[in-house]
Amino acid sequence: MTQKVLVVGAGGQLGQELQRTSGPAIECLPRTRTQLDITDRTAVAQCFASVEPHLVINGAAYTAVDKAESDADAAQCGNVVGPLALAQACAQQGVKLIHLSTDFVFDGRASQPYKPDAPTSPLGEYGRSKRAGELAVQSALPQAVILRTGWVYSSYGSNFVKTMLRLMQEKDDLAVVADQIGTPTWAQGLAEAVWGFAARPQLSGIYHWSDVGVCSWYDFAVAVCEEALALGLLVRPVNIRPILATEYPTPAPRPAYSVLDKTSSWRDLAVAGVHWRQQLRAMLEDYKGLQHG
Ligand SMILES: NC(=O)c1ccc[n+]([C@@H]2O[C@H](COP(=O)([O-])OP(=O)(O)OC[C@H]3O[C@@H](n4cnc5c(N)ncnc54)[C@H](OP(=O)(O)O)[C@@H]3O)[C@@H](O)[C@H]2O)c1
């Protein structure tokens, strides 16, 4: 039987990759923010009534990490009020929900990968709103899957890889933070993991997903440069200098270490995960194809 899946936040990085990767057993029903604002309860109810989904995937979020520091209300609205409205509608209709969250629920003081049940302690407004959203979703719909991820990039939208590519085309020298460690996540691999959860309705609770391995933002930038040169997306190498996070102050504090432990996702989805560097190469090939497409 075909599964009708409502994808909200369909215009975002994950939302677009979900549409590209849905399999033949899925009827993917994407809704961008203009088509459905998840903070509008009436619109959510109308959408559920017309679509009658079997499953909802929430790719919508307020993701402006720095802006959230001066606009905590907007972050709470997008990341708590909206997800709660979706979870309550799902509970009423007996529909499953896959909700996305973030590594920014942790404070980054750990020195080994965070397990899904590790204590949370967000450093900024974005992380606080996403953690509050997790709790709201769980209270309204305990059978929801909450999938935390981090350092997401894709051919679509704005992200670190595309910003680096642009800066590397414009400048001869770049300084990139080397004392914040995490794992990049190609949105296409994340979308495939989400479809894995969609195919296993018996799963619920908090899971983690990123690609495999660890790096600093500096290592990530060096890899972008090397892979882009190899693919002809850059014509000359750029000098990349490692700096401390204190030399690049941002409104929102970032965790120094935000590596997620993916063991339970790999086990329950029966997948091995792919190294971040291999995924970066695949994304840049994809991006090049779309540019010349
Ligand atoms: N990007 C990352 O590095 C990262 C890291 C960790 C976790 N995550 C999480 O992963 C998920 C997907 O992230 P992403 O990178 O795909 O984000 P994204 O590219 O910023 O996409 C988010 C989408 O949500 C839409 N949206 C915002 N408020 C909405 C609302 N009230 N109703 C409906 N749609 C709304 C946005 O529309 P507009 O653009 O029109 O506002 C945008 O299309 C999010 O839950 C995010 O918190 C992301």
Image (spheres, rainbow, N blue to C red):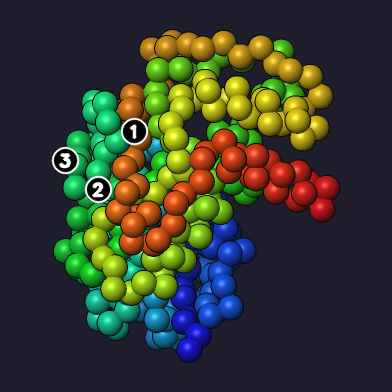
The front one of 148 and 249 is 148
Q: Amino acid at mark 3?
A: Pro
Q: Amino acid at mark 2?
A: Pro
> What residue appears at the point 61 percent right and 14 percent down from the top-left corner?
240
| Nearer the camera: disc 2 or disc 3 | 2
Q: Which mark is residue 247?
A: none
Q: Amino acid at mark 1?
A: Ser
Res. 41 visible in picture: no
Residue picked out by circle 2: 116
Res. 169 visible in picture: yes
Where in the figure is residue 163, as x and y percent of width and height?
61, 31
Is 287 situated left or right of 105 in this image?
right
**Of label 3 and label 1, which has the lower sequence position?**
3
Determine the CA span between mark 2 and mark 3.
9 Å
Mark 1: give few (<14), some (14-19) or many (20+) Cα within 10 Å: many
Where in the figure is residue 248, as x and y percent of width and height?
45, 15
- The quadrant in which residue 118 appears is top left
Residue 94 vertical placement versus 104 (above, below): below
Secondary structure beneath label 3: loop
Determine the CA span between mark 3 and mark 1.
13 Å
Residue picked out by circle 3: 119
> What residue appears at the point 26 percent right and 39 percent down from the top-left corner?
114
Residue picked out by circle 1: 258
Q: Are marks 2 and 3 in contact (CB under 8 Å)?
A: no
